[in-house]
Image (cartoon, helix red, strand yellow):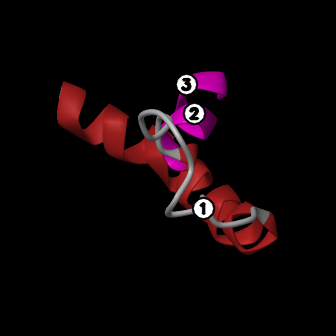
Amino acid sequence: MGVHCVQQRLRRPVIRLWALIAPLLPPWPEEAPGPRPVPDRLCLEGIL
């Protein structure tokens, strides 16, 4: 099994979890001061 196949298998649960979590997160305000934060999905992938 190649590295690509393993990565794809590991991402499937993250995709399913993201589908459940994303609607619960508030949108980032467009006029917030400072740089935009790291995207929420990347944070979730880093945690998992």
Q: Position of residue 38 (x, y in %)?
A: 47, 35
Part of the protein shown in magenta: 41-48
Mark 3, Cα crowd under 10 Å, few <14 / some 14-19 / many 20+, is few
Q: Is residue 25 above or below residue 13?
A: below
Instruction: Report whether 22 appears left or right of 9.
Output: right
* Amino acid at circle 1: Pro
Contact, mark 2 vs mark 3 (Cβ under 8 Å): yes
Residue at horizontal 22 percent and vertical 26 percent from the top: 3
- Asked if residue 46 lies in the magenta stretch, the reply is yes
Of residue 36 and residue 47, the one placed in the foreground of this image is: 36
Q: Which mark is residue 46?
A: 3
- Name the residue carrying label 2: 43
Q: Position of residue 16 (x, y in %)?
A: 63, 64
Quadrant placement of the N terminus: top left
Of residue 24 and residue 11, the one placed in the foreground of this image is: 24
Mark 2, Cα crowd under 10 Å, few <14 / some 14-19 / many 20+, is few
* Amino acid at circle 3: Gly
Residue at horizontal 57 percent and vertical 33 percent from the top: 43
Label 2 and label 3: CA atoms lie apart by: 5 Å
Q: Which mark is residue 2?
A: none
Q: Which mark is residue 29?
A: 1
Residue at horizontal 64 percent and vertical 70 percent from the top: 19
Of residue 5 and residue 26, the one placed in the foreground of this image is: 26
Residue at horizontal 58 percent and vertical 49 percent from the top: 14
* Amino acid at circle 2: Cys
